[in-house]
Image (cartoon, grey):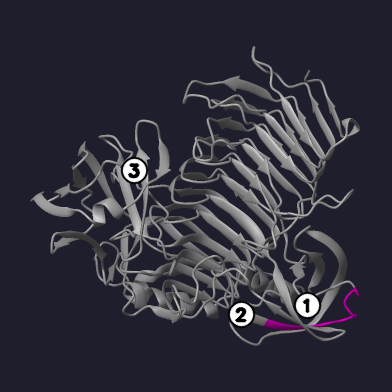
């Protein structure tokens, strides 16, 4: 009997050990520049036979082409509309479908993707870890050129070697591997300030282009309104988000460690209805030494309808055309009442639709969009998509009598706790962090450096982007906010708590319990904090320093508070110029402050 148990324990121990599967076994060779897509997929499929496995890539370069890649069909939040991208077909480099306990070990390798591809998809999987690898594209979706000489009638620019172009009938066209830029969107990067501002391609598209050397082009036309200077880098992409950088869908316990995303097509790393996401030492920034300035055509990390714990630690974001981090759910609008327990719901935003926003057993709340007022709670009994834009849900109990057509539902089961720490946000055109989740949020020990708009934005809306929901427990502490908001003046608040409730209800507050403490704010202008419809807002023990980064605008209040209560502002350090507070739809008892 003793021998039996010893053998049993040895067997269990063996089963718990990860089995290493080397991709070279399937014919994948590093630094061969051959298409590794099919052979790597065979290696991925081999992990199914193991209880726990490590897929090992000997260090080197691996190339992936769409020709032999898995074709998928995903509706991805915040990506594209029916008009922009009517058929949701995407080619995927690494496809991890219905897998468990798999680690992809890159050993410092770089995965180079060709054409338009999603670098990886993790779908219906559990306990997946990617580590020690870099992602790049042979031809990044972003085109870049450095402006050398600028006059009212001409511009001479040096084209980045990675930005393929052709001059056809006197017009410059950007192209890649089986794609061409058609719907131009341009952002100007100023290297000496590390700032990004909105620009335009119209003046260039209407001008005459002439190649004067292999990578130098002279544009002749009307550039009298071009707000640029020599040395600026104009970055141009297609504004349609037909692809994403990576996609985690309906998966659980996903870890990314020591990952470099040097370039991504469309939206960034998107996680949709996934649970427990741990991102450590993920860098979304151009490859050092590449000369590129943009890494992502849109967001860095996007989380839609997730739950469990999201942790972002030791990460860095630099060179993005949109927000580094965005966490939200999706409000669906009530379009028809079929019966007392059956509702037809509609996806409203043009870029978000087609996925199962509700599942049986999910808890939901009902709300009036104009006020964002929650007035009831329920549970889903059955749910199905009846078209790309519509869902039919059956409730366990009748919906509230005050529910009407045009009201909205939020899925509160799929709302995550979020921790963002020890990370750096810089060189982004828009915000640093967007957070709308009702569970615990901690944002600490980060550096927000010259984000184009608010460093942190807390919204919630059911009439525009339809991104849910309210926050109930947010701590923002020990961060450095340095010269943020230069793209959003005059309302360039470093932190903006801005629920989109256009109708204020007495004694009803959208957001609750937001603590901003022990941070350092280096501001060049007056606006610091704006808050609306918030109960329990604390701004204490922060240090505020003045900077000469840019000229200040007209004098304005540092604090703009609208319909808030339970506000505490104490122990903050200001310079010689004392801040002012603007209150609206509030009583004196709603705020306790030592700012005189």
**Residue 38 falls in which quadrant of the image?**
bottom left
Residue 140 image position (x, y, % from top left): 32, 58
What crowding class fits label 2: few (fewer than 14 Cα within 10 Å), some (14-19), or many (20 or more)?
Answer: some
Dot 2 or dot 3: first in sequence order is: 3
Whole-Å distance between the Cαs marked 2 and 3? 42 Å
Residue 408 image position (x, y, % from top left): 75, 69
What crowding class fits label 1: few (fewer than 14 Cα within 10 Å), some (14-19), or many (20 or more)?
Answer: few
**What span is in magenta?**
391-401
* 2 or 1: mark nearer the eye: 2
Image quarter (top left, top right, bottom left or bottom right) of the N terminus: bottom right
* 2 or 3: mark nearer the eye: 2
* 3 or 1: mark nearer the eye: 3
Dot 3 or dot 1: first in sequence order is: 1
What crowding class fits label 3: few (fewer than 14 Cα within 10 Å), some (14-19), or many (20 or more)?
Answer: few
The answer to the question of whether label 2 and label 3 lie on touching residues, with beta carbons closer than 8 A, is: no
The stretch drawn in magenta includes residue 397: yes
What is the secondary structure assignment of the residue under circle 2?
loop
Residue 385 is marked as: none
Q: Nearer the viewer, residue 528 or 50?
A: 528
Residue 91 as seen in the image, left or right of residue 525: left
In the picture of the structure, the residue carrying the numbered disc 2 is 389
What is the secondary structure assignment of the residue under circle 3?
loop
In the picture of the structure, the residue carrying the numbered disc 1 is 1
């Amino acid at each position: 009997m003793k021998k039996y148990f010893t053998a049993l324990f040895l067997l269990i121990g063996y089963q718990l050990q990860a089995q290493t599967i080397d991709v070279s076994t399937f014919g994948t060779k590093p630094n061969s520049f051959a298409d590794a897509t099919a052979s790597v997929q065979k290696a991925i499929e081999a992990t199914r036979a193991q209880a726990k496995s490590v897929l090992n890539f000997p260090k080197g370069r691996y190339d992936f082409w769409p020709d032999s890649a898995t074709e998928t069909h995903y509706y991805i939040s915040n990506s594209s509309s029916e008009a922009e991208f009517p058929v949701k077909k995407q080619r995927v480099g690494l496809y991890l479908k219905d897998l468990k306990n798999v680690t992809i070990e890159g050993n410092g390798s770089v995965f180079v993707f060709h054409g338009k591809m999603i670098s990886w998809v993790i779908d219906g999987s559990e306990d997946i870890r990617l580590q020690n690898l870099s992602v790049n594209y042979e031809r990044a979706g972003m085109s870049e050129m450095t402006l050398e000489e600028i006059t009212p009638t001409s511009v001479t620019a040096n084209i980045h070697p990675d930005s393929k172009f052709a001059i056809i009938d006197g017009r410059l066209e950007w192209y890649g591997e089986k794609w061409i830029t058609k719907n131009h969107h341009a952002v100007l990067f100023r290297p000496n300030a590390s700032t990004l501002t909105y620009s335009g391609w119209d003046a260039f598209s209407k001008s005459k282009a002439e190649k004067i050397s292999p990578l130098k082009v002279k544009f002749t036309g009307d550039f009298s309104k071009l707000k640029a200077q020599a040395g600026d880098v104009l970055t141009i992409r297609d504004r349609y988000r037909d692809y994403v950088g990576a996609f985690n869908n309906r998966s659980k316990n996903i870890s990314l460690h020591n990952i470099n995303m040097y370039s991504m097509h469309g939206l960034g790393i998107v996680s949709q209805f996934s649970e427990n996401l741990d991102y450590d030492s993920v860098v979304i920034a151009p490859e050092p030494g590449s000369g590129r300035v943009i890494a992502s055509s849109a967001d860095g990390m996007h989380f839609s309808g997730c739950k469990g714990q999201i942790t972002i630690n030791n990460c860095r974001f630099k060179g993005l055309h949109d927000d580094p981090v965005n966490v939200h759910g999706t409000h669906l609008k009530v379009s028809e009442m079929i019966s007392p327990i059956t509702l037809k719901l509609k996806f409203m935003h043009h870029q978000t639709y087609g996925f199962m926003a509700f599942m049986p057993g999910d808890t939901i709340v009902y709300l009036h969009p104009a006020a964002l007022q929650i007035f009831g709670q329920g549970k889903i009994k059955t749910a199905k998509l009846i078209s790309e834009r519509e869902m039919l849900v059956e409730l366990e109990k009748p919906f509230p009598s005050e529910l009407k057509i045009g009201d909205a539902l939020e899925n509160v089961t799929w709302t995550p706790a979020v921790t963002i720490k020890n990370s750096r946000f810089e060189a982004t055109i828009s915000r640093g962090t967007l957070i709308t989740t009702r569970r615990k949020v901690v944002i600490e020990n980060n550096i927000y450096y010259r984000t184009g708009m608010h460093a942190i934005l807390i919204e919630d809306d059911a009439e525009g982007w339809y991104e849910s929901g309210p926050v109930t427990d947010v701590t923002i502490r020990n961060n450095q906010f340095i010269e943020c908001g230069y793209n959003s003046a005059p309302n360039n608040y470093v932190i903006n708590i801005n629920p989109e409730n256009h109708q204020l209800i007495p004694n009803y507050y959208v957001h609750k319990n937001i603590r901003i403490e022990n941070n350092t704010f280096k501001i060049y202008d007056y606006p610091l904090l704006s808050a609306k419809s918030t109960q329990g807002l604390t701004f204490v023990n922060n240090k505020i320093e003045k900077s000469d980064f840019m000229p200040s605008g007209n004098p304005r209040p540092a604090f703009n508070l609208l319909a808030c209560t339970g506000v505490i502002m104490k122990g903050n350090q200001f310079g010689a110029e004392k801040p002012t507070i603007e209150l609206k739809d509030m009583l004196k008892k709603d705020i306790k402050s030592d700012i005189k």
